[in-house]
Amino acid sequence: MLRRRDGAGARVLARRVAVQRLDVAGGGAAVGRRRPRGRPEHVREQGHPADHHVRRLHERRLLRRVPEHRSGPRLRRGAAGLAAVTTRVRVETLEIPAAALGAPSVLPDVGDGVAAPYATDERFGYGRVPNLFPYLHQDGYGRELRPTPFRAVVLENRHLTAVVLPELGGRIWSLRDRARDVDLVYRNGAVQLGNLALRNAWFAGGIEYNIGTRGHSPLTCSPLHAATVVDDGGEPSVRLWEYERQREVVFQIDLWLPSDSPVLLAHVRIVNPGDDTVPMYWWTNAAVPQTPETRVLCPARTALTSDYTGALRQVPVDRPEERLTWPAAAARAADYFFETDPDADRYWIVSADARGNGLALLSTAPLRGRKLFCWGTEAGGERWQEWLSPFGGRYGEIQAGLAATQYEHVPMPARSEWSWVEAYGNAALDPAIAHDPEWDAAVRHADERVAALWPAEVREEHLRRLRHRALLPPSARVVTGSGWGALERRRRLADGQPWLDETPTPFHDDTLTGEQRSWCDLLAGRPAWAPGPPLSYVRGADWERRLAGTPSTWPSELHLAVMAHARGAHAEADRHYRRSLEHAATPWALRGLARLAADAGRSGDAAALYRQALALTDDGRLVEEACRHLLRAGQPAAVLDRLCGPDIPGPRTARLRLLLCRALAAAGDLPAARRVLEDGLVLPDLHEGETTLSDLWSELFPGRPVPPAYDFRIA
């Protein structure tokens, strides 16, 4: 049986309200009054970058049309917007300037090392993952922005309008306080991708959900399954769910905006259906608008801070002269993990602007951790803000997590279930008190407002109703996520292993795609492999056992090698890579052997293997990896032989130009190396904390200041 872990039970019965639908299924005429044309409320305020770059495609619906749901009395519109107490859930298409994600890398992540800022000291070893296998990196994007349609789910009552993008990790793109005419979360003018997530691609803004291991989730730029849910009383909500492949758990988020509620609710449920305890990680990250007056409040006197070195130190947050909780006053990028009371009656963190408006992020247990992140005002932090928000705007982040810091994981027992509720709304603080240098007075005031925003008795009722709602089946599909949940169900049932009740989180067979085809064939006992590099990878002893029982081919041996490599069994991986090469010479098996040789300190052998691999492919990612090693091995001439000439097309062109610049410098051709930087070099996937451009500039132009375009230094 699954064991539950959630907040306190409810004692108050819910009032049921009627539902009124605007039926647009099948493209027929709408039943009831048509929604007036015009910009929706969430893009109405003047002067916001999104006003010029985000627009609604009027009356367009999804490929599978979804009915609009309303709860409460009939909708009446007037100058004040929604005049009646009502909740609406509708599906729209938003066109947003966005960088195309591109195809994922074909190179499996088999390394044993996590780059800063995700590296930590040994105190936090539990749950640390050596790599992101079986996920493939999402590094195929550039900097060019094009108008891109996204499916959006809008939840709206007279207090709030929330816009959710299921295709982008379920991000709450915007949350607007209608009465006060203010955005509670930072609404970016574009989906400008950058290398800040575990799988590389990430974008700033909104409210983001992160699961699995420390960092921005592997699913943050991937579609989640999404559907509307209508309860027995007709109240609508939105459900997001997916299977997380590293921890092998299912998570679900039910977003509900009750009639006349000043808070948007998110009921989070994680189910571990397996027989093993798994390290669990969850942090909800909310980007909030940053102004010179913005202040963050949290019921704590101290915080643990980290500044991208991996070390933590305790600092006081209640000293007015330090101004640590004013993000715009921070010089450098930093994390502040507030040391809150783990047994508090409520858990919260609030951002307040000059008028006292801002997001309050509240939750029930076990989501107790609270954090503030700020980029800082030095050149590097300002550059990162510009890089991620090309149409202007500044943001900080307030966050909530399962553990006290993001360096930690929490053991989740086998066959268990955890759940909690998060609430997002405007605490509407008195600005004079919220910005009082006296910390205790400001925190007391915020605590009173938070208690009024989401009273304890209302919280208990919401928790009770959301527990019930979380087990209801979806009503209408909005977005289809991955097919990995359906494949995992097939695998577990084929082996007689436990699986979960899919009633609330169905993984239908129609979600299976080409990524899962070879693995479905393997489960059926008829393995078939497509030519070329594998489209996907899987992990786990059961898959390895099944592969070992099939005829030896270059793909089967390659997959066995990669699985062993990713879990650190290097001798076993070496054996399977060589068996794969006995069947066919492929760059992918040669690359695996090269990685093993490099990790073993055999740099010369690795260089020779990479050169063999390069003779078989023009894949830009493999060329990049090979050239990086050749430079480390002291062979710049080999890099120049490969890179001098026309650019290799594809998403890695800029990285290859960077390697060319370094090879020219290493070979002594400084004028040519300098020209590469002087001509301008833009790295779309510059990693958070990476100083490659500024370091190279200082090396090639000693004594000259680093140009602002190259200055991303934040540590």
Image (cartoon, helix red, strand yellow):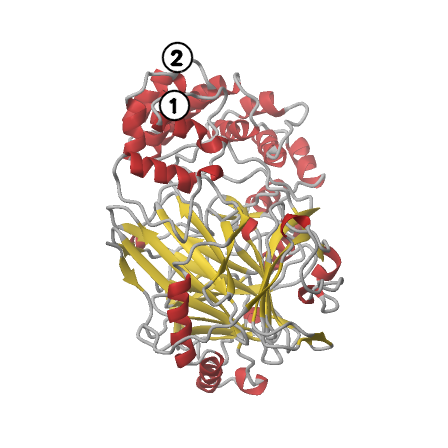
The image shows residue 367, relative to residue 483, as above or below, that is: below
| Residue corresponding to mark 2 | 583
- Please indicate whether residue 78 sits to the left or right of residue 287 in the image: right
Name the residue rendered at 42%, 75% in the picture: 14
Amino acid at pointer 2? His
Front position in the image: 560 or 154: 154
Considering only order in the chain, which callout, 2 or 1, is on the residue closer to the N terminus?
1
Front position in the image: 650 or 553: 553
Q: Position of residue 567 (x, y in %)?
A: 31, 35
Name the residue rendered at 41%, 66% in the picture: 466
Give residue 245's quadrant in the image. top left
Image quarter (top left, top right, bottom left or bottom right) of the N terminus: bottom left
* Classed neighbour count for the residue bearing mark 1: other residues with Cα under 10 Å, few (<14), some (14–19), many (≥20): many
The image shows residue 294, relative to residue 97, as above or below, that is: below
Q: Identify the element where label 2 is drawn.
A: helix
| Residue corresponding to mark 1 | 558
Amino acid at pointer 1? Leu
